[in-house]
């Protein structure tokens, strides 16, 4: 059985009404609200065909139908109208992002807040993955006889300072020699590649004092590199789910919050997703805990290199056209914000 033009119009009307009302849709409702030009009886027959084809489901407690994951997928791919943001929404996004142009993490955090406020869903924003980040400079600064600060600078300008307890005697000269050796060995190398290398082996030496100093410092060096590679995930609007009828069931709400509470697992899922505007609906999500959810992510760039993600998660009954339009505009503004910031730095 093929999807005729009439079936597509009916399906689009059902999705539109159900997304707005959260109530199963019947043939009389469609006939009254939408100018389909056919009788309720004909609509009912077409709805039966759509159910048989897997585009509609029939809740036991209602005579109406609701869209299936398959219907939402067809809608997103082929039927979804492009929606323009209101001037107020555009102003809100531009003003809020520009306000924190010099504070990268705060800007990303505000992106999540803006997305949550406009969509009324749970939103998130992830700082860029740093697989391409390279090491520029290492320094070791003495504080007292037992404390040294390890400074690592990446090519993107990120600086990490770590205070370390040193258990062996050292001289400032030995610290500088080791720092220069570390810089020489790893300058220009990706942080991920440095971690994969045989770091301990690279700094073996016949000079016992230097060897013992290196043995003390290198574990902290590796740990700091790992922390520099970590991404930050900012979430907002977690309580928005309690305004949605899908989560009036407390067990379902608890399951949703438990999913997001596992922040490391959720971050890993986001990192593994493809770049661009990606929409996964219900059972398309690999995690069984997300079978009742839709996840929409979009990517943003920093200076054309590092890529982070923003997105929303919520029930499959979602305003896909409006949300993807908001996210497109938001990522465009993030890209322009960070391009401008980069340009300003370059011109200094």
Image: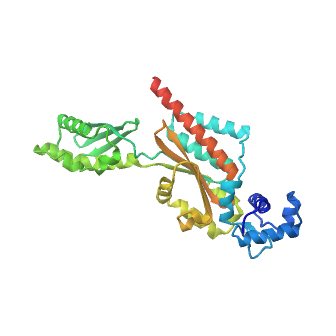
Which image quarter holds the N terminus? bottom right
From the viewer's perspective, tell me whether residue 122 is left or right of residue 183. Answer: right
Q: Quadrant of residue 109?
A: top right
Image quadrant where residue 134 sits: top left
* x and y percentages locating residue 296 in the rendered image: 60, 54
Task: For the C terminus, give its image quadrant.
Answer: top left
Seen at 52% across and 33% down, the residue is 339
Q: Is residue 220 left or right of residue 279?
A: left
In this rendering, is residue 167 above or below 284? above
Image location (x, y in percent) of residue 235: 56, 51
Q: Nearer the viewer, residue 264 or 302?
A: 302
Q: From the viewer's perspective, is 333 left or right of 144? A: right
The location of residue 107, given as percent across then percent down, is 55, 40
Residue 167 visible in the current orientation? no
Task: Say which of 276 and 237 sits in front.
Answer: 276
Compared with residue 86, is residue 318 higher up or lower down, i.e. above or below?
Answer: below
Q: Nearer the viewer, residue 35 or 348?
A: 35
Using the rendered image of the protein, determine whether residue 232 is visible from the camera's viewpoint: yes
The number of discs equals: 0
> What colour scheme was applied to this rendering of the protein?
rainbow
The picture places residue 14, in percent across and down from the top left corner, at 77, 62
């Amino acid at each position: 059985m093929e999807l005729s033009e009439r079936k597509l119009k009916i399906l689009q009307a059902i999705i539109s009404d159900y997304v707005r009302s959260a109530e199963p849709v019947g043939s009389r409702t469609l006939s009254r609200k939408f100018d389909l030009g056919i009788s309720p009886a004909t609509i009912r027959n077409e709805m039966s065909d759509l159910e048989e084809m897997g585009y509609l489901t029939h809740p036991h407690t209602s005579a109406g139908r609701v869209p299936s994951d398959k219907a939402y997928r067809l809608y997103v791919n082929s039927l979804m109208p492009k929606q323009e943001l209101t001037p107020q929404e555009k102003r809100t996004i531009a003003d809020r992002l520009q306000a924190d142009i010099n504070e990268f993490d705060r800007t990303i955090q505000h992106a999540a807040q803006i997305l949550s406020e406009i969509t009324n869903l749970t939103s998130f924003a992830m700082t860029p993955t740093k697989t391409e980040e390279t090491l520029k400079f290492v320094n070791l600064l003495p504080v007292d006889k037992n404390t040294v600060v390890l400074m690592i600078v990446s090519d993107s300008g990120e600086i990490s300072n770590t205070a370390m307890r040193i258990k062996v005697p050292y001289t400032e000269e030995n610290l500088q020699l080791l720092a220069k050796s570390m810089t020489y060995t790893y300058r220009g190398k990706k942080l991920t590649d440095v971690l994969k290398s045989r770091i301990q082996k690279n700094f073996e030496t016949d000079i016992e004092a230097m060897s013992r100093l290196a043995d003390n410092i290198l574990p902290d060096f590796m740990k700091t590199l790992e922390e520099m590679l970590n991404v930050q995930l900012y979430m907002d609007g977690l309580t928005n789910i309690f305004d949605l009828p899908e989560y009036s069931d407390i067990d379902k709400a608890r399951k949703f919050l438990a999913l997001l509470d596992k922040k490391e697992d959720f971050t890993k899922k986001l990192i593994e997703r493809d770049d661009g505007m990606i929409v996964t609906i219900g059972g398309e999500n690999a995690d069984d805990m997300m079978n009742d959810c839709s996840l929409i992510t979009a990517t943003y760039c920093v200076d054309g290199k590092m890529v982070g993600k923003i997105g929303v998660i919520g029930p499959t009954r979602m305003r896909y056209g409006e949300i993807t339009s908001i996210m497109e505009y938001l990522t465009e503004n993030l890209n322009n914000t960070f391009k401008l910031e980069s340009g300003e730095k370059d011109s200094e």
